[in-house]
Amino acid sequence: MHIATLMLLGSGELGREFAIAAKRLGCRVIACDRYANAPAMQVADACEVFSMLDGGALRAAVERHRPDVIVPEIEAIDTATLAELEKEGHRIAPSAKAVQLTMNRDGIRDFAAREMALVTSKYKFAESRDEAIAAAAEVGVPCVVKPVMSSSGKGQSTAKTAADVGPAWDYAVENMRGDRPRVIVEEFIDFDSEITLLTVATKDGTIFCPPIGHRQEAGDYRESWQPAAIPEGALMSARHQARKVVEKLGGHGIFGVEFFIRGDQAIFSELSPRPHDTGMVTLISQFPNEFELHLRAILGLPIPSVELIGPSASAVILASEESEDFAYEGVAEALAVGAPRRPVDLRLFAKPKTLKNRRMGVALARGDNVDEAVERAKTAAGRVRIRYGGK
Ligand SMILES: Nc1ncnc2c1ncn2[C@@H]1O[C@H](COP(=O)(O)OP(=O)(O)OP(=O)(O)O)[C@@H](O)[C@H]1O
Ligand SMILES: NCC(=O)N[C@@H]1O[C@H](COP(=O)([O-])[O-])[C@@H](O)[C@H]1O
Ligand SMILES: [Mg+2]
C-alpha cells in the first residue's frame, strides 16, 4: 500500500515538512520525539514518544515498526544504537557515519579540519572551566564557546575578553543537551556573510542548491534568503569542500553545509546530514524544496533539476516566554502582506509549549530581489503575535 515506511527520529518543524513530502509520495511515516504532539506527529501515520538518547527505547521503537529507512531529524540521538542497527541491516539516512559524526561538534569539526583538511576557524575542546580558559588563551579572544552537543545556538556565547570565558563555560554546561560537559572554543570569524549550501548526495551524483544567506542572533537564525550573492571564488570553494565532505560521509540525502564567507574565502563551519532550518526558505523559493530533495535522494528517486522560482526569504516567529496556554494571533494580517500581487505564506508549528526564544513559526515571502523578500517576510512574521494565557 505504501511505497516505503520511514521512521523520523525528531519530529520538529523540519520533520513535519519532511513528513508532508513523504505522505504526498505515498509513504508511511512514523514520527518519534521526546514529547507528544510534536509538529511531525500532527501529520504522521503513527507516533512514538520516548527519549531518543535511550538506546533501548530506540531499538524497541525500530523493532516495533520495522521501517525501511530511519531518518534522523535532530542531533540528540543515541547514535551508537543507530550504528548497530545499520550493521544489522537497517537503513539510516543518509548513513550512520554521517549521523554519528555530526551528533557532536567535536566529531564533525575534527573530521572536517583534520581528515578532510577543510579551512575552519581555529578551535580547541575543553572539559572543564580551567580547560576552557586555557583553550581561549590559545585560540585568542574574542572566541565563541559552544557545548559540543547542542543546536540552534543553545548554550552558545561569545567571550569578548578572557574574563568572559569562565561564565561562557558555565552557560554552555547549563544549556547543553546530553550529559557530556564538553565545549568547543572557536576563534571568532569576522565574516562578510554566511551561507548554507544545501548539497544533495544522490545515487546519480552530488547536486547543489543555490546558496542560502542567513542572519543569526544568539546562535539561531532570524532570516534566511535565496539566492545569496557571494563572490564566485567563494561559491566554487564552498562547493568543492561540501562535495568532498558529503561524499566521504556517505549515503544519500540532503546536507546543510554551513560556511562563513570572507572575501573569496569559504570557511567551513558545520553541517547537518538532513534538511536545515535556514533551508525552510526553499518551501517558497525552489522546486523540489529541501524536504522533497531529502526524500527523493533517500528513496533513490530521480532529481532531474532543481528550479529556483525567484528571490525569496524566510523570517522566524519566536516565543518570548514559557507557556502551555498560548494562542497565535494576527494570522490574517500576516497573510495580507503583499496581497494581491505576491502573497506571503506562513508555517505555524503548533508545538504544545512555548519557551523563551523557541521557534514557533516562519513567514515565507518572494520579492523582486532578496532584500525585498526579506523585508516582506519580516513584516509578515512581525504581524503574528503569540498571546500567553489570559494576557
Ligand atoms: N567561530 C565563529 N565566528 C563567528 N560567528 C560564529 C562562530 N561560530 C558560530 N558563529 C555564529 O553563530 C551561529 C550559530 O553557530 P553554529 O551553527 O555553530 O551553532 P548551532 O547551534 O549548531 O546552530 P544550528 O543548529 O542552528 O545550525 C553561526 O551561524 C554564526 O552566525
Ligand atoms: N537548528 C536545528 C533545527 O532548527 N532543528 C529543528 O528544530 C526542532 C527542535 O525544535 P525545539 O527545540 O523547539 O523543540 C527539530 O526537531 C528540528 O525540526
Ligand atoms: Mg549552524
Image (cartoon, rainbow, N blue to C red):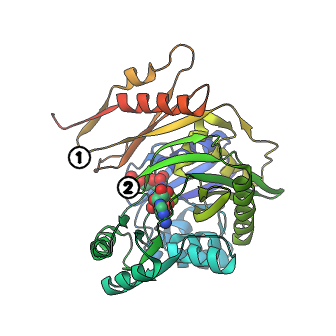
2 or 1: mark nearer the eye: 2
In the image, taking residue 293 as reference, residue 189 lies left or right, namely left
Q: Amino acid at mark 1?
A: Ser
Give me the residue at 66% from left, 47% from top.
230
Residue 247 in the image: x percent, y percent? Answer: 75, 67
Do we see residue 325 in this rendering? Answer: yes
In the image, taking residue 186 as reference, residue 288 lies left or right, namely right
Quarter the C terminus occupies: top left
In the image, taking residue 103 as reference, residue 92 lies left or right, namely right
Q: CA distance from mark 2 to mark 1?
A: 21 Å
Provide the residue designation for mark 1: 323
Q: Nearer the viewer, residue 324 or 229?
A: 229
SS for callout 2: loop
Residue 280 in the image: x percent, y percent? Answer: 55, 43
* 284 to 150, vertically: above or below: above
Provide the residue designation for mark 2: 218
Q: Amino acid at mark 2?
A: Ala
